[in-house]
């Protein structure tokens, strides 16, 4: 593990084995950008972890530029606590690797260095620029494909800032003089409370369609508005999201649900139409005012997450598909009764519901490239949720339900559904009270067993 002094100076050595070339222009001064002196911004080194400062200082004193970058600079300016602290430098990955013995180079498309400390991993990237594109001939009928597949061309700080996604994420904190460097107007956009894509939205969203989801994420997380041209770009290119990598899309969806701003994010995805090509089943179930309880459910979920309670990915995804699953089950039951009033004969039995849910969600899970374990947990949570809606009268069956692995996920799902829809509130309270009694009894039994063991040891 890294134990050396951050003040230690090592001689700079350019990576001789790098196959990528630096930009032809490497000016010794900051290119045309807005430089905010240390006295004119709110970032303090006291807010930056010691390990990150170690990395910044060693790079700087070894003759390299060393900047804090991205969302950490944005959050520090806004008085927030950053989730991650990333570093960018003009040192090549091999150079960084030689400076820090406790490091490793990762990635193929985008080579990074992870510097591993006992309690933290600091990610270091080299300044990059937009890759060169071979545009089709002017008379060609082939549409130009903007999708980025190679992003490993080294560049200058200005080029690195311009290749980033949004202005609010493209500022640097320079450890050399503690200034903030802003090439793209990020400070102004933070002050105005807006999310603005860098460059032409028509190009940037086709380069990486996931940027549209990230625009929505930042607007929801920070309480910002999406700048008009950026918003119109999402409307024009929403179908491009189908070209994005399925695992990246599913991770972005989970990120929207995990962090406590899901209601605003999903609402924006519906308003922009981005959800329609991505998850048409869910879009058709929640658009307009079709499922008012769903938006209340997301509100309850956001409050729960913000309170610090851990919600599993299976429950988060189950919340997202709930309106669709409910619609499909109600449609199937209506088909069975042929337009008559609901009765017991037309209701699906629990075994039928379980098979129906599995067949319903498996194509969606495959489309999102969800891991088999996540898909299984999601199925189990939804199936057990439906079991809990009809509590068994037999006490043994109730005990068996509580001790099943999916019970906690299903109970969390029932809590969210009951508190948002006003339905099955009594059922939720009964199961919650029963689960508390079972847990208390189990703890008492375990305590008694431990006491007996102690007595035997003394004898």
Image (cartoon, grey):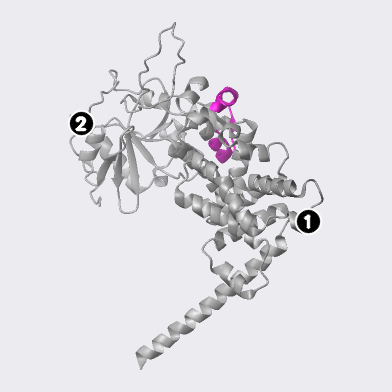
Span colored in magenta: 216-239
Q: In the displayed structure, does residue 162 sit left or right of residue 107?
A: right
Q: Residue furthest top?
A: 139
Q: Main secondary structure of the magenta part?
A: helix
Q: Nearer the viewer, residue 419 or 122?
A: 419
Residue to which mark 1 is pinned: 343
User: Is 236 in the magenta?
Assistant: yes
Residue 219's place in the image compared with 154, above or below, is below
Q: Classify 10 Å Cα crowding around label 2: few (below 14), some (14-19), many (20 and above).
A: some
Q: Are marks 2 and 1 in contact (CB under 8 Å)?
A: no
Tell me, for residue 416, which label it has, or none: none
Residue to which mark 2 is pinned: 15
The C terminus - image quarter: bottom left
- Find numbered disc 1 in the image and state the secondary structure of the residue it sits on: loop
Residue at x 43%, y 82% (from the top left corner):
450
Label whose residue precedes the other's in the sequence (2 or 1): 2
Residue at x 35%, y 89% (from the top left corner):
457
Q: Residue furthest bottom?
A: 459
Q: Position of residue 349 (x, y in %)?
A: 67, 58
Residue 37's place in the image compared with 359, above or below, is above
Q: In the displayed structure, does residue 230 sit left or right of residue 371?
A: right
């Amino acid at each position: 593990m890294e134990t050396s002094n951050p003040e230690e100076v090592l001689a700079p050595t350019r990576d001789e084995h790098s196959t990528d070339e630096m930009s032809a222009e490497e000016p010794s001064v900051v290119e045309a950008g807005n430089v905010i002196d240390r006295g004119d911004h709110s970032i303090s080194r006291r807010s930056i972890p010691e390990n990150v400062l170690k990395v910044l200082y060693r790079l700087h004193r070894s003759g390299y530029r060393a900047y804090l970058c991205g969302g950490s600079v944005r959050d520090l300016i806004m008085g927030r606590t950053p989730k991650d602290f990333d570093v960018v430098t003009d040192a090549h990955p091999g150079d960084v690797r030689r400076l820090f013995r406790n490091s490793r180079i990762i990635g193929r498309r985008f080579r990074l260095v992870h510097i591993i400390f006992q309690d933290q991993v600091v990610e270091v990237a080299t300044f990059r620029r937009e890759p060169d594109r071979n545009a089709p001939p002017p008379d060609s009928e082939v549409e130009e494909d903007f999708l980025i597949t190679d992003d490993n061309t080294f560049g200058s700080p200005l080029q690195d800032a311009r290749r980033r996604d949004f202005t609010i994420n493209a500022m640097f904190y320079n450890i050399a003089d503690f200034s903030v460097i802003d090439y793209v107007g990020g400070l102004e956009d933070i002050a105005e409370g807006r999310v603005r894509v860098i460059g032409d939205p028509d190009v940037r969203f086709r380069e990486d369609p996931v940027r549209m989801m990230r625009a929505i994420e930042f607007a929801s997380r920070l309480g910002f508005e999406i700048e008009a041209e950026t918003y119109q770009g999402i409307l024009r290119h929403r179908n491009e999201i189908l070209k994005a990598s399925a695992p990246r899309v599913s991770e972005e969806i989970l990120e929207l649900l995990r962090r406590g701003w899901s209601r605003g994010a999903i609402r924006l995805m519906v308003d922009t139409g981005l959800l329609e090509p991505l998850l048409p089943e869910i879009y058709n179930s929640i658009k307009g005012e079709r499922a008012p309880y769903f938006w209340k459910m997301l509100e309850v979920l956001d409050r729960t997450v913000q309170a610090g309670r851990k919600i599993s990915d299976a429950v988060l995804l189950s919340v997202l598909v709930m309106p669709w699953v409910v619609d499909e089950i109600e449609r199937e039951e209506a088909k069975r009764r042929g337009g008559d009033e609901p009765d017991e004969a037309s209701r699906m039995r629990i075994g039928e519901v379980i098979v129906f849910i599995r067949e319903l969600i498996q194509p969606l899970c495959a489309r999102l490239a969800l891991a088999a374990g996540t898909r299984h947990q999601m199925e189990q949570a939804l199936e057990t949720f439906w079991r809990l809606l009809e509590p068994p009268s037999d006490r043994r069956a109730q005990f068996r339900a509580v001790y099943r692995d999916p019970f906690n996920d299903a109970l969390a799902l029932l809590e969210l559904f009951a508190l948002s829809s006003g339905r099955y509130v009594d059922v939720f309270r009964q199961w919650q009270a029963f689960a508390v009694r079972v847990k208390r009894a189990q703890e008492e039994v375990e305590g008694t067993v431990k006491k007996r063991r102690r007595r035997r040891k003394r004898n």
